[in-house]
Amino acid sequence: RPYINRKKTFGITGRYFFDHRREFAYATRGNKQILFDDQDQINYRSTKAILSFHFRPRVEGFHEWLLKYENNLVTDSILDLNPQYFNNRSRFRFLEIDYVFRRERRDNRFYPIKGNFLEAEVQKIGLGLFNHVNKLNTSLAYAHYFPLLDWLNLEMRVKGQREWMRGQHPYFGLEALGYGEDYVRGYEFYVIDGTDFLVSRNSLRFKFFDRIFDLKKKMPVKNYRLFPVTLWFTVNADVGKSFNYLFNEENPLNNKWLFGKGVGLDVVLYYKYAFQIEYSINHLNEKGIFLHIRSDF
């Protein structure tokens, strides 16, 4: 991160994004996204500009303040299919201000064995300039890692989100479970929209292979010639719920506790690249094999 003082505790970052799509999801039915595809025109346009200020007084503590401007447009074809996508608007824009606090006490943030992690966030979406949206959201995530034996540890993660201002809500921005890393294992093929959600993901992990290979000159990059490989067998159990007071008629998984369980194989390379192959079962008795790339949380 670019720091602006000698102690490297304070920094500023600017980012700009644009997204143009001919195909995108305009609604959710049966807890599956419904796609609209028109290759003759761009149906969704989005631009975002973000300015962030970050402060790290200690190694384990991190504060970030973000100011974001977002401008989104859809064609009339989308409004015909789902008038509530932007609350009967073709243009949806807003200013947003966020505060994020992170406390990092894990031994390895890519695949931790011991320690804990905490992240808290407050979002104010809509600052009164455009009057397209007015939301106040908070979220809290916590993870704890218990080293039980040299070859055995327990991972417990929980995350919750709450929207405090109720009102007429567009379909846009209702992402809860099934997006990014916020999912219950066994429900990877579903999205459970909502304003609020709670999810807990837990794994008992058994290490059965741990070896460092010397690739020597077969690897042209010197820093990667020593090739550590660690394999873990996991037993997984998840639970989660999305709370949604909108758009529930055709989505039976909304407002219900979801349970997922299964086993998996975690492949950790170079102590920082983690791939997960998991066999999971959900409460509908649906089974599947899923591949995940592990993120920081």
Image (spheres, rainbow, N blue to C red):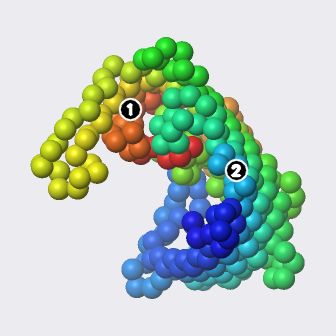
- Residue type highlighted by circle 1: Asp
- Residue type highlighted by circle 2: Arg
Callout 2 secondary element: loop
Q: Give coordinates of residue 219: x percent, y percent.
A: 17, 51
The quadrant of the rendering that contains the N terminus is: bottom right
Q: Which residue is mark 2?
A: 58
Q: Which residue is mark 1?
A: 266
Callout 1 secondary element: strand
Give the left or right position of residue 140, taking residue 40 as reference: right
Which of the 4 image quarters holds residue 96? bottom right
Q: Give coordinates of residue 183: x percent, y percent.
A: 56, 42
Question: Is 115 drawn above or below residue 71 in the view shown?
Answer: above
Front-lying residue, 83 or 166? 166
Label count reads 2
Q: Residues within 10 Å of mark 1 (few under 14, many from 20)?
A: many
Of tags 1 and 2, which is closer to the observer?
2
Which of the 4 image quarters holds residue 143? top right
* Residue 212 shows in the view: yes
The quadrant of the rendering that contains the C terminus is: top right
Spatial CA span between label 1 and label 2: 31 Å
Give the left or right position of residue 59, taking residue 206 as reference: right
